[in-house]
Image (cartoon, rainbow, N blue to C red):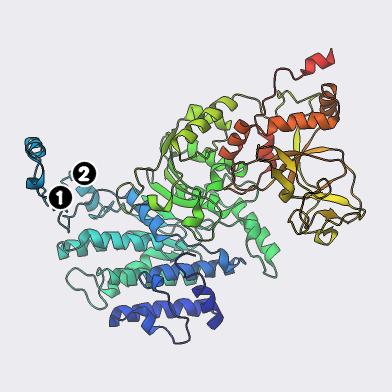
């Protein structure tokens, strides 16, 4: 966590472990602070840790963290991995979906204090000839269609589309930020207009969450946010403010407990804008640590697969290790009105992982997937997170269209106005024909560099290599007698067999154990295995000597193999490192290796002195710079998946003996 507050929540847990009490005390203190005009820090219990200054300005953000930690523990996860949506990101997403404000501006247009008379005579005459209009505060939008939408309850005068929903409320951050934006738009405006527009907004909010603690906390949070921004009074109705009693009644109607995935949407009218950051949680990771967790996970999976709407399965994209955020995307598009907008925060693995192919196909063919904000260095926005983030923009039940890929996006690119992003953020339009050829109908979205020249090179590589057969294709040059190349994971699970893996000791009879750390690269770019069994220049305390010796039971002894480093740091220049593994070595599960059928091996031997020489020849082609650029563009995450390697468009020279020639 940034700004020196990383330990405050952990210290709070040590003095008060009950998460429900933490949240209740925080909300009660926040309300007391608003009533007494005293800082929250002065009203907290004495045994609470000292509140850092960075947490004083936004009480709602502290609540978001406490609720995120509560959700993590409820799922059996560590609270350290709890990452609430950053307010800065929420503001940018909201800004991109806002409409023109129909309220008179509250602040005068800022004009320059520089006097024209200070300009040189030639410049002054030129400016006077331009006949620039004087700045005016009369910028009220006169749009009958927009005003009609206000009258029909489809938007507020402040520019918020209605109804506005969140299918996984989680504290109501998006709606809390909408309240602030709404209040800013009405600042210093007509009090009666503000009150009517606030009533219009609060009558058209739809927030749903499965956790009763979250629901009650969200209600009180939105009430306090509205009081804080002077839209609601503590008591009876006053000029410009609706009463607390009325607001509580509206929140009872607008914030409800329920299961968005399995239950019905509890409002008669569907939303026109749905803003959400649902749980990023695989079903297999749910209920961890619970005594009957395995049974609960099994039941949840069966329930989600059997829920139907009009006799049809509600979720058509359940595949592999189902992650709940995927189901929330499909469910949200069902809930939205036709033409309604979904803006969702999700992990960027959605853009490229194989198991998300059915969902991407749904977004492309049944809806209008318009935007994808790529935030690759998410740790700068979500402190401590290594997973990249994508913000999806989808128009429900609309005609398919080109996808605007925006990014990579940095924290400084987020804006609270305009389109939500800086004009410096590169934009690439993915037209369906080119996109389809690249991704082979999987609609995977490539990772593109920010630098203009690097991006140009990546696009050239994608266009060229996309026309080639993939490594495991039937028509790839290596395929022999219908035997394709296959990729396997190393035979030893390092966690399960930890007691059989030791530090390398010279002279002891044992077998080399190869991990990802043993892959190294010379200054010239040559990849090699740096293991003490094969090199004498490794210091005694080097990491390559640790966990480098297999002393367990004998496994089948394999001949030389072609292997790939399975985990590569995102900041390194290369994505893949291929090297030939000497005969007799044992591979850990952090290493992938190519499995060649004996027919393919014979083809390599026929053109090389030995199988080792043939593998090294193939290894040189796998370490090709363009191929590595391709791999980085389609990487779903830091892990290298088997299917990712099998789908590499490995180009071999024309001199490689063709299968038909060998048959003759």
| Location of mark 1 (residue) | 140
Tell me the quarter of the image containing the C terminus.
top right
The residue pinned by badge 2 equals 145
Identified at 34% across, 81% down, the residue is: 32
Q: Residue at x 41, y 64 (%)?
A: 172
- Percent coordinates x, y for residue 134 in the rendering: 8, 46
Q: Is residue 645 left or right of residue 224?
A: right
On the rendered structure, is 393 left or right of 116?
A: right
Residue 37 shows in this picture? yes
Estimate the x, y position of residue 357 in percent, counting from the top left.
58, 40
**Image point (36%, 50%), residue name:** 272
Q: Quadrant of residue 72?
A: bottom right
Q: Which mark is residue 461?
A: none
Res 271 visible: no
**CA–CA distance in space, label 2 to label 1:** 14 Å
Mark nearest the camera among 2 and 1 is 1
Q: Secondary structure at mark 2?
A: helix
Q: How many marks?
A: 2
Question: Does residue 475 sit above or below 587 in this rendering?
Answer: above
Residue 234 drawn above or below residue 102:
below
Identify which residue is drawn at 83% across, 28% down. 601
Which residue is outermost to the top? Answer: 664
Camera-nearest residue between 142 and 471: 471
Disc 1 crowd rating (10 Å Cα; few below 14, some 14-19, many 20+) is few
Image side of residue 535 versus residue 65, left or right = right
């Amino acid at each position: 966590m940034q700004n020196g507050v990383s330990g405050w929540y952990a210290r709070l847990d040590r003095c008060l472990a009950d998460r429900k009490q933490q949240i209740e005390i925080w909300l009660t203190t926040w309300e007391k602070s608003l009533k007494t005009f005293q800082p929250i820090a002065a009203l907290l219990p004495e045994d609470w840790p000292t509140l850092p200054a960075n947490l004083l300005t936004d009480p709602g953000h502290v609540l978001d963290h406490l609720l995120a930690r509560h959700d993590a523990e409820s799922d059996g996860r560590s609270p350290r991995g709890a990452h609430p949506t950053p307010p800065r990101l929420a503001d940018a997403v909201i800004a991109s979906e806002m409409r023109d404000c129909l309220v008179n501006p509250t602040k005068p247009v800022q004009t320059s204090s520089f006097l024209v008379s200070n300009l040189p005579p030639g410049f002054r005459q030129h400016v006077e000839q331009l006949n620039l209009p004087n700045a005016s505060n009369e910028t009220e939008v006169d749009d009958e269609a927009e005003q009609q939408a206000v009258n029909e309850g489809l938007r507020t005068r402040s520019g918020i589309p209605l109804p506005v929903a969140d299918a996984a409320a989680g504290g109501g951050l998006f709606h809390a930020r909408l309240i602030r934006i709404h209040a800013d738009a009405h600042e210093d405006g007509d009090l009666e207009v503000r009150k009517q527009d606030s009533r219009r907004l609060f009558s058209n909010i739809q927030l749903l969450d499965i956790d009763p603690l979250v629901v009650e906390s969200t209600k009180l949070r939105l009430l306090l946010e509205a009081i804080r921004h002077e839209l609601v009074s503590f008591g009876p109705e006053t000029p410009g403010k609706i009463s607390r009693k009325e607001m509580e009644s509206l929140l009872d109607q607008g914030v409800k407990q329920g299961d968005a995935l399995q239950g019905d949407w509890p409002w008669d009218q569907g939303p026109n804008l749905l803003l959400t950051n649902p749980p990023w949680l695989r079903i297999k990771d749910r209920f961890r640590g619970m005594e009957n967790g395995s049974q609960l996970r099994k039941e949840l999976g069966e329930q989600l697969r059997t829920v139907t709407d009009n006799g049809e399965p509600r979720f058509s994209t359940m595949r592999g290790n189902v992650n709940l955020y995927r189901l929330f995307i499909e469910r949200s598009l069902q809930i939205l009105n036709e033409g309604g907008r979904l803006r969702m925060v999700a992990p960027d693995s959605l853009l490229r992982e194989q198991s998300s192919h059915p969902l991407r196909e749904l977004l492309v063919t049944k809806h209008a997937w318009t935007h994808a904000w790529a935030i690759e260095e998410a740790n700068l926005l979500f402190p401590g997170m290594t997973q990249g983030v994508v913000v999806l923009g989808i128009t429900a039940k609309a005609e398919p269209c080109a996808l605007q890929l925006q990014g990579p996006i940095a924290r400084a690119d987020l804006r609270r106005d305009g389109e939500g992003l800086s004009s410096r953020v590169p934009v690439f339009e993915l037209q369906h024909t080119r996109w389809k050829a690249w991704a082979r109908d999987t609609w995977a979205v490539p990772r593109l560099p920010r630098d203009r020249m690097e991006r140009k090179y990546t696009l050239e590589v994608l266009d060229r290599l996309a026309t080639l057969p993939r490594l495991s294709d039937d028509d790839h040059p290596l395929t022999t007698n219908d035997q394709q190349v296959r990729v396997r994971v190393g035979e030893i699970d390092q966690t399960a067999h930890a007691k059989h893996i030791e530090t390398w000791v010279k002279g002891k009879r044992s077998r080399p154990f190869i991990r990802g750390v043993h892959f190294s690269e010379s200054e010239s770019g040559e990849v090699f295995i740096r293991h003490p069994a094969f090199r004498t220049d490794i210091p005694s305390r080097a990491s390559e000597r640790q966990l480098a010796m297999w002393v367990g039971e004998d496994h089948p002894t394999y001949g030389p193999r072609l292997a790939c480093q399975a985990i590569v740091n995102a900041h390194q220049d290369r994505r893949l490192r291929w090297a030939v593994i000497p005969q007799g070595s044992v591979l850990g599960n952090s290493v992938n290796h190519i499995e060649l059928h004996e027919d393919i091996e014979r083809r390599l031997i026929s053109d090389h002195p030995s199988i080792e020489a043939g593998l090294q020849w193939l290894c040189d082609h796998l370490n090709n710079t363009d191929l590595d650029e391709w791999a980085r563009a389609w990487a779903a995450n830091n892990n290298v998946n088997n299917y990712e390697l099998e789908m590499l468009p490995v180009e071999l020279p024309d001199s490689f003996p063709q299968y038909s020639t060998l048959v003759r």
